[in-house]
Image (cartoon, rainbow, N blue to C red):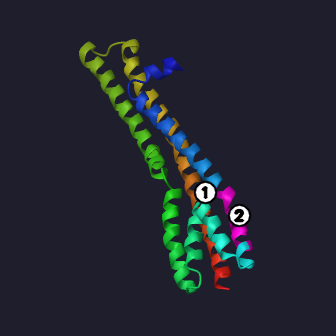
Amino acid sequence: MIDFFTRGGPLMYPILLCSVIGWAIFMERIFAFIKVRRHLIPLQNSVKGFLQKDQAKEAVDLCTQQKTPLAKILLVVLKNRGCQRSYLKSLAEEVGEREAISLQRYLGLLGTIANITPLLGLLGTVLGMIKAFNVIATQGMGTPATLGGGISEALITTAAGLTVAVPMLLLHRYLSSRSERLVLELEEATMHIIDLVEE
């Protein structure tokens, strides 16, 4: 494996770096999404229980203690209880948009990695073919042994770039869809609490 890596040339290092960064982003986002989802339903039920018992202050204190996206959204709603539904909804949407952006943190970088690694592989292909043609220019047609180094480098970097890019593209799609689902769940939970506050 190490021999395969070294034969790919210097562009194997940035390709490897892109792979490491991409998988690190995936793991970080997965843990972040799990944390948000784990606290979503319990917080919603707790706030709902406080509101049904006319304990709005306890609900505000609970949301202040927690730092989850839903807590930040509900805190704004609870602090402005008594206002019109449309106003509460606009406040929740404003905070929710900021929280949605935080849920999508690093996804742009992951998409960039998915797009740039095939280009790095293609650049390695071009450099490898230039090396092979330089051999032809200096030694004539040469032998398979002399041409093989450049052609091998060209093929290895292309394969490595695609090997990294395909999973990164799939991971980006998966994380994006999961982020959208979480935003929808946050919106549904918020609207449920707004209905209770309005009542």
Rendered residue at 49%/67% (across/down): 97
**Residue 59: horizontal and vertical position, in percent?**
66, 70
Q: Judge whether 167 appears above or below 56 on screen.
A: above
Rendered image quadrant of residue 128: top left
In front of the other: 128 or 195: 195
**Residue 161: horizontal and vertical position, in percent?**
46, 35
Quadrant (top left/top right/bottom left/bottom right) for the N terminus? top right
> Element at badge 2?
helix
**Residue 87: horizontal and vertical position, in percent?**
52, 83
Q: Residues within 10 Å of mark 1 (few under 14, many from 20)?
A: some
In front of the other: 63 or 20: 63
> Which residues make up the magenta segment?
36-49
Q: Which residue is mark 2?
A: 41
**Residue 85 covered by magenta stretch:** no
Q: Nearer the viewer, mark 2 or mark 1?
A: 2
The kind of secondary structure the magenta stretch mainly shows is helix
> Element at badge 1?
helix
**Residue 20: horizontal and vertical position, in percent?**
50, 35
Rendered residue at 27%/13% (across/down): 139
Three-letter code, disc 2: Ile
The residue positioned farthest toward the left in the image shown: 138
Q: CA distance from mark 2 to mark 1?
A: 17 Å
Q: Which mark is residue 178?
A: 1
Three-letter code, disc 1: Arg
**Residue 39 covered by magenta stretch:** yes
